[in-house]
Image (cartoon, rainbow, N blue to C red):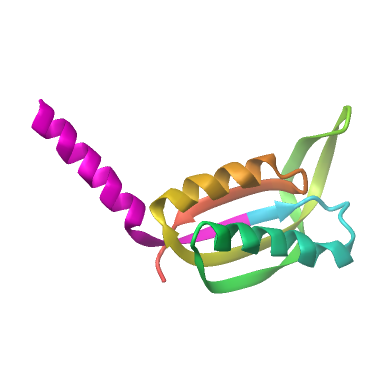
Amino acid sequence: MVEETATVIDEVADDAVLSRVYEIGYHIIPTTPEEDLEKIVGDIRSSIEKVGGNFIAEGAPILTKLSYEMDIQEVDKRVSHDRGYFGWIKFEAPVTAAITLDTELKVNPNILRAIVFKTVR
C-alpha cells in the first residue's frame, strides 16, 4: 500500500515537470472596443509566461457570429451575446499550467468563454 502511494506521488511529480503542447481557444465579449483587444490578449499571454509557457502560434481575435447566444453576468444583470471575438493561442507548458490557465480564464470578466486543451505541435 505504501509503495503504491509513493509510485502515484512520483508519477504526479513527474507530470508537473513534463511539458506538453496546449491550445487556448477563447471568445472575448463583443462589447469590448477593438483597441482594447490587444491588451486582453496580452494579459492571456502574460498568464502563459507566468506559468512557464513558450508560445508556438497564435490567431488574432476576430468578431464572429456564435452558433447560439451566451449569457454572462455583467455588474448586476445577465446579458446575452450572439457574437464574440474568437482567437486562439498554442503554447508549450508544464502540465500544471493548463489547470492554472483554465481557472484564470474562467474568472476573467472580458472572456465570454474559453477552453484549454492538449494538442500536437
Residue in view at x 84 percent, y 53 percent: 30
Which image quarter is the N terminus in?
A: top left
Residue in view at x 77 percent, y 48 percent: 110
| Closer-to-camera residue (27/47) | 47
Tell how many labels. 0
Would residue 30 appear left or right of 57 to someone viewing this image? right
Q: Quarter-wise, where is residue 69 in the image?
A: top right
Which image quarter is the C terminus in?
A: bottom left
Residue in view at x 56 percent, y 50 percent: 101
Would residue 19 appear left or right of 25 to someone viewing this image? left
The verdict on residue 5 being magenta is: yes
The verdict on residue 70 being magenta is: no
Overall secondary structure of the magenta stretch?
A: helix
Residue 96 screen position, x and y as percent: 43, 49
Residue 114 screen position, x and y as percent: 62, 49
Residue 86 screen position, x and y as percent: 70, 59
Figure check: 60 above or below 118: below
Residue in view at x 58 percent, y 42 percent: 103
Figure check: 82 above or below 8: below
Which residues fall within the magenta stretch?
A: 1-25
Q: Quarter-wise, where is residue 44 in the image?
A: bottom right
Would residue 64 appear left or right of 49 to someone viewing this image? right
Which residue is situated farthest in the bottom direction here? 57
Residue 31 screen position, x and y as percent: 88, 51
Figure check: 71 above or below 102: above
